[in-house]
């Protein structure tokens, strides 16, 4: 039953909702939320749960990627997590390929690429299913002259799976495209994790992250330009993570800034 407009108290911030998906300006009926907002919250919560638990259709994603001109044929692999429940309960199992997939990738490896392309479902299959193909279509336009691996689709994968894949392929760098933890306003957010010199056991401090890649967030071309910038700059200093500041929007990087964390004490003098 809709809220009676005579008892509904609108919030003056409501007009600002056209600028954001954040839950602001909800209004109230007495001391409670309006029915429309309560129902909207329940729908968003259900969508977030579905994003986590719905399996990635890896075959369909591979088909979509075959339609992206300039990409090699995708390869579908699997981590050591035996099921979605196992993946959620045991995070380390999503960080390395199982024995069969390891052997498959080793057999398929060719010349070491400049960049290994890894797709993982992560915590939102929606994100990978909907955003990876259009992102890569934009990305290829920014990395001419670079050698890219065939897309490696990893089911039940976490961010660190890129280290294992990149190590096997002997790639100079790896870009992991993975579904981010869904929020109540963004169940389909894709994260990009870039790492120079991938090898198993690396810490997160070695990665650069570009977040919220989706039609309603950071658009594909801007995300692609930022990822290509990271690859170009990392090749100059041969590292990534906290030593590589993302200045893709402009601005110079001096030599000291490349190797200094913002947590470091300022020099005297």
Image (cartoon, grey):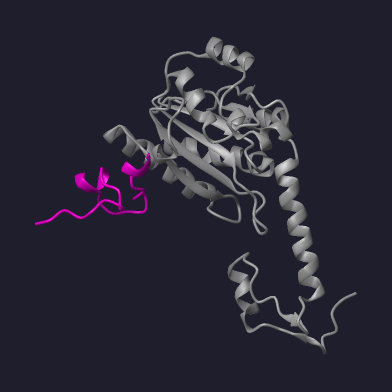
User: Is residue 266 located in the magenta-colored stretch of the structure?
Assistant: yes
Residue 128 picture location, percent across and down: 63, 39
Q: Is residue 245 above or below residue 146?
A: below
User: Is residue 114 located in the magenta-colored stretch of the structure?
Assistant: no
Q: Nearer the viewer, residue 73 or 171?
A: 171
Residue 146 picture location, percent across and down: 40, 28
Residue drawn at the location 30% of the way across and 32% of the way down: 238
Dominant secondary structure (helix, strand or loop) of the stretch shown in magenta: loop
Q: Is residue 239 above or below residue 47?
A: above
Q: How many marks?
A: 0
Seen as rendered, the residue at the extreme bottom is 6
Seen as rendered, the residue at the extreme left is 269
Q: Is residue 122 above or below residue 115?
A: below
Q: In the rendered structure, which segment of residues is drawn in magenta?
A: 241-269
Residue 193 picture location, percent across and down: 48, 39
Which quadrant does the N terminus fall into? bottom right
Residue 182 picture location, percent across and down: 65, 50
Image quadrant in which you'd find residue 126: top right
């Amino acid at each position: 039953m809709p809220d009676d407009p005579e008892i509904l108290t609108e919030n003056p911030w409501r007009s600002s909702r056209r600028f954001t998906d954040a839950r602001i300006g909800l209004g109230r009926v007495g001391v409670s939320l309006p029915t429309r907002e309560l129902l909207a919250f329940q729908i968003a919560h259900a969508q977030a749960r579905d994003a986590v638990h719905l399996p990635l259709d890896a075959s369909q994603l591979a088909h979509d990627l075959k339609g992206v001109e300039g990409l090699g044929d995708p390869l579908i692999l699997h981590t050591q997590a035996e099921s979605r429940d196992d993946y959620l309960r045991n995070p380390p199992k999503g960080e390395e390929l199982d024995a069969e997939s390891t052997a498959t990738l080793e057999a398929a490896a060719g010349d070491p690429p400049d960049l290994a392309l890894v797709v993982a479902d992560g915590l939102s299959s929606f994100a990978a299913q909907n955003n990876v193909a259009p992102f890569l279509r934009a990305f290829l336009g920014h990395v001419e002259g670079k050698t890219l691996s065939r897309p490696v689709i990893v089911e039940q994968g976490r961010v660190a799976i890129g280290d294992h894949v990149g190590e096997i392929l002997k790639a100079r760098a790896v870009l992991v495209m993975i579904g981010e933890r869904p929020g109540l306003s963004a169940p389909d957010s894709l994260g990009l994790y870039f790492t120079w010199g991938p090898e198993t056991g690396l810490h997160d401090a070695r990665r650069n992250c570009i977040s919220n890649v989706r039609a309603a967030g950071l658009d594909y071309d801007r995300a692609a330009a930022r990822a290509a910038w990271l690859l170009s700059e990392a090749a100059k200093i041969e590292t990534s993570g906290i030593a590589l500041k993302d200045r893709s929007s402009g601005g110079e990087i001096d030599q000291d800034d490349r190797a200094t964390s913002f947590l470091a004490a300022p020099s005297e003098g």
